[in-house]
Every structure is written in C-alpha cells, then in structure tokens.
Image: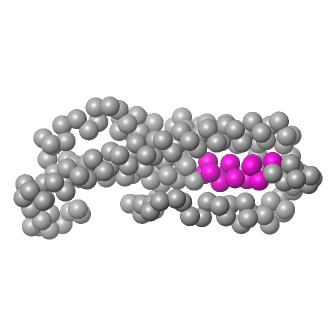
Amino acid sequence: MDTELDRILADDYLDGLEVRSTAELREQRAECQAVETQVSYLRRMVQGRHDIVAGELARRDGGDAPSDVSDLVDRLPEILADRIHAPGPGRLPASMEPGELHGALADRLAEITGRVPIESPGDADHEALASAEHDLRELEAEVSRCRRQLFDRIDAVQAEITRRYREGVAKVDDLLARGDEA
C-alpha cells in the first residue's frame, strides 16, 4: 500500500488532469478508490483497537479490576457503539474487499497492538495501556488525514470527468459503447 499511497498523495499526482484521456482518468479514479478502501479498512481496525484499549482504561479508572476475555467479549457492543455512525454524510465504499493490509501504517498498528494484545487488554499494565491508547489515537489521526487526502484526489479526478461530460468533451454514448463504468 505504501508505494501506491505515496504516489497518489504526492504533490504532482493531479498535475495534467486536463490533458489525460478520459479512460486514464477513470483508471486514476479507480486506483485512488482501491487505495482508499484499504486505508478505510485500516482506519477501522485502528479505531476498533483504540476503543478496546480505551475501554479497558476507562474500566480501570472506574475502579474495576482488569477484564478477562469473556468480559471483553460481553462489553464489545458497548465499547464499539460510538463508532457505528460517523459524522457527516459518509461515502459508500467502491469495493468491499480491502485486500491484505501492508505498509508502514499497518506495521505501526501491528507494533502497537503487539505491546497490548487486543484479545486480552486486561493482561497489560496501566502504563502499557495508556501508551497504546495514545499511539493508537495518533495513528488514527494520521490514517484519517491520508484518507481525507485520498478523497480530495478522488474528487478532483471525478470533477474533471464530470466537466468533460458537462461540456461535451466526453460522450455518454462512448461510455456505453465500451461497457465501462462512469
């Protein structure tokens, strides 16, 4: 994911949109959407792990003993409930298959959760939990920034495609004749 993400987020990625063919723009949009699907999935993985770690910290701060696996499973709906509805209108994913997560951001998630096993956060000491919560919060913010930048690129490419159809540069008949998707 790193190579594609770095290339898409590079300052010059959107240079020359107006001279690319409409087919190239569609490919570019699809590429951005595929990477965004991976980043969205990674973001959700980070958020879920953060919620579990933060839930364990809150439990302890409330005076309760560290939880065990069965208690964690019982509390998961409550722990994860605040992430059911995101703010804003949201976007439907272009694909439901994020593929295998790899790259620096996924490696950071693995490193953080390696310090505090997500299936048994009650086994970790308070300091390890607090450190993991902080690192997961920072990672989620970074992944969210990447995701917003990907949406900016998707929107810019889509705006150029839309402009072409609106101004008659691209024709819907050409799209239908090839069987491509808009």
Q: Which quadrant of the figure contains the N terminus?
A: top left
* Name of the residue lying farthest toward the top: 11
- State the image coordinates of residue 103 (x, y, percent, origin top left): 51, 37
Tell me which secondary structure the magenta stretch mostly adopts.
helix
Residue at x-position 92% and y-position 52%: 63
- State the image coordinates of residue 77 (x, y, percent, origin top left): 71, 66
- State the image coordinates of residue 160 (x, y, percent, origin top left): 20, 50
Compared across the picture, whether 112 is left or right of 58 comes to left
Q: Which quadrant of the figure contains the C terminus?
A: bottom left
Quadrant position of residue 162: bottom left
Residue 23 seen in this snapshot:
no
* Name of the residue lying farthest toward the front: 88
- State the image coordinates of residue 80 (x, y, percent, origin top left): 68, 60
Residue at x-position 44% and y-position 53%: 37
Residue at x-position 78% and y-position 64%: 75
Compared across the picture, whether 171 is left or right of 99 comes to left
Q: Is residue 55 magenta?
A: yes
- From what the image shows, is residue 21 above or below residue 127? below
47 or 166, nearer to the observer? 166
- From what the image shows, is residue 180 above or below residue 161? below
- From what the image shows, is residue 124 above or below residue 69? above
Residue at x-position 22% and y-position 35%: 15
Q: Which residues are magenta?
A: 45-57
